[in-house]
Amino acid sequence: MMAAKKLNPDGTQANNANGGTTYGKNSSNGMNNSEMNSSLQKDIVYKVQIGAFRKHSREIVQKRLEKKTDKTMLTSYDDLTWLRFFMGAEGNYKSAKNLRETLRQAGFGDAFIVAFKETKPMNLSEAIKITRANNTANTDTND
């Protein structure tokens, strides 16, 4: 009688008791590292924060900022205590840095970059690492 094979959650064969190799895909979601980095990166957007407000209503702040900016590039994010306004939605950090410098020259001296994953802010250093890892992986596979 054959012993039953242990399977991972994705249906691939699990390591056996003798230390055998796992067969199948590299991760439980079926993506390899390059595919996972690419998937993570496409959800990352870099925006430049130009203001944060506590006491003013969205409508008042938005009207004031629209007079000074391109309103098609203006977005906002509400957390529990701040109403934050951003410009741009860049796919890479370098483009966001260029936008930040342009906005600083236009009078938004305290402008800074915030990374978003889907619709929520995320750690900027982590976003840069993911973006760089993916760009390196794409360069390696395109040679």
Image (cartoon, rainbow, N blue to C red):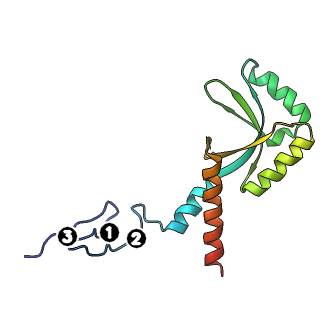
| Foreground pick, 107 / 28 | 107
Residue at the top extreme, as displayed: 55
Do the residues bearing badges 2 and 1 touch, measured as CB atoms within 8 Å?
Answer: yes
Asked which secondary structure carries label 3, the reply is: loop
Cα distance between the residues tagged 2 and 1:
7 Å
In the depicted structure, whether residue 46 falls above or below residue 30: above
**Amino acid found under the numbered disc labelled 3:** Ala
Instruction: Tell whether 18 sits left or right of 60.
Output: left
First in residue order: circle 2 vs circle 1: 1
Indicate which disc, 2 or 3, sits on the residue closer to the N terminus. Answer: 3
Which residue appears at 68% of the width and 26% of the height? 82
User: Which amino acid does the dot numbered 1 rest on?
Assistant: Thr
| Callout 1 crowding tier (Cα within 10 Å): few <14, some 14–19, many ≥20 | some
Tell me which numbered mark, 3 or 1, is placed earlier along the sequence: 1
- Label 2 residue SS: loop
Tell me the number on the disc at residue 17: 3
SS category of the residue bearing label 1: loop
Q: Quadrant of residue 35?
A: bottom right
Q: Which numbered tag is attached to residue 12?
A: 1
Pointers 2 and 3 in contact (CB under 8 A)? no
Say what amino acid the circle numbered 2 marks: Lys
* Front tag of 2 and 3: 3
The answer to which quarter of the image holds residue 62 is top right
